[in-house]
Image (spheres, helix red, strand yellow):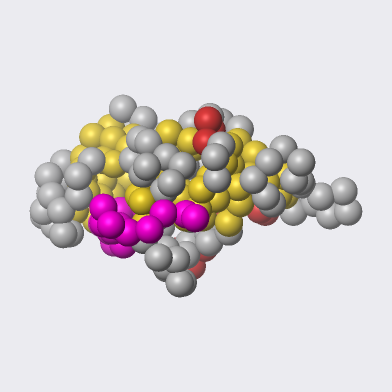
Amino acid sequence: MRKIHSTSIKKRSVAQIFGALGIFALAAIAPAAEAQDQLTPGSFRAYAAEGIEPRLSDFSGLPVPRYASLRFDEVNGRSGPSLDYPVKWTYERAGLPVVVIRESNEWRKVRDPMGDEVWVNASQLAEQRTAITTHAGAMVETPAPESLPAARFSPGTVVSLGDCGTVWCPVTAQGHKGWILREHLWGADTLPQATATTPGNR
């Protein structure tokens, strides 16, 4: 979930986007109705490098770009890499997947599932791999089209992500384990890889 910080306007629709849990078992774990209604496959933006050269960061030593997830239920995204910059978004969904696209000493510029970019303090990010569903569908018991459903989900469901195959990804969410089609997950695509000789940030 995220909300816009503004003194002049309120956008409740944007404020509700990343708050839904989204998984519901055949016995029902339902998302917030407002968020479910607002998210569609078109709400999400696939990661595109757009001139960003894969590299190893001079600051963390980790590859950029790379996936990360929000560590807390409330994380501020700022317009620049310090507390002096204003807050653009407040994300309210622990585990939300993001792509780290740039780094400074203590800050990381991230791109969220809707394509927006903000700076987040490094302490607010976790390395845990997660993904968010872009479609409504079923989590199945085995990675096969004829498999029985273990749970159903709506767009905007955050799941913990295992090692994906070409077609299916193993996931867990709200106590449920199963498989979801890779094409229905934002955060499961392979990112461009840096090499040991790739220049860093500077």
In depth, the one of 158 and 51 nearer the eye is 51
Q: Is residue 57 above or below residue 92?
A: below
Q: Is residue 68 above or below residue 114?
A: above
Residue 187 magenta: yes
Residue 99 visible to an observer of this rendering: no
Which residue is outermost to the right? 8
Q: Quadrant of residue 121?
A: top right
In depth, the one of 60 and 3 nearer the eye is 60
Q: Position of residue 158 (x, y in %)?
A: 41, 42
Please tell me which residue is depicted at 56% across the width and 37% down the height of the picture: 106
As drawn, is 34 to the left or to the right of 193? right
**Dominant secondary-structure state across the stretch colored magenta:** loop
Please tell me which residue is depicted at 19% across the width and 44% down the height of the picture: 163
The magenta region covers: 182-202
Q: Position of residue 103 (x, y in %)?
A: 51, 48
Residue 30 magenta: no
As drawn, is 200 to the left or to the right of 92? left
Placement of the N terminus among the 4 image quadrants: top right
As drawn, is 94 to the left or to the right of 129? right
Please tell me which residue is depicted at 55% across the width and 45% down the height of the picture: 104
Q: Position of residue 39 (x, y in %)?
A: 52, 57
Q: Quadrant of residue 157?
A: top left
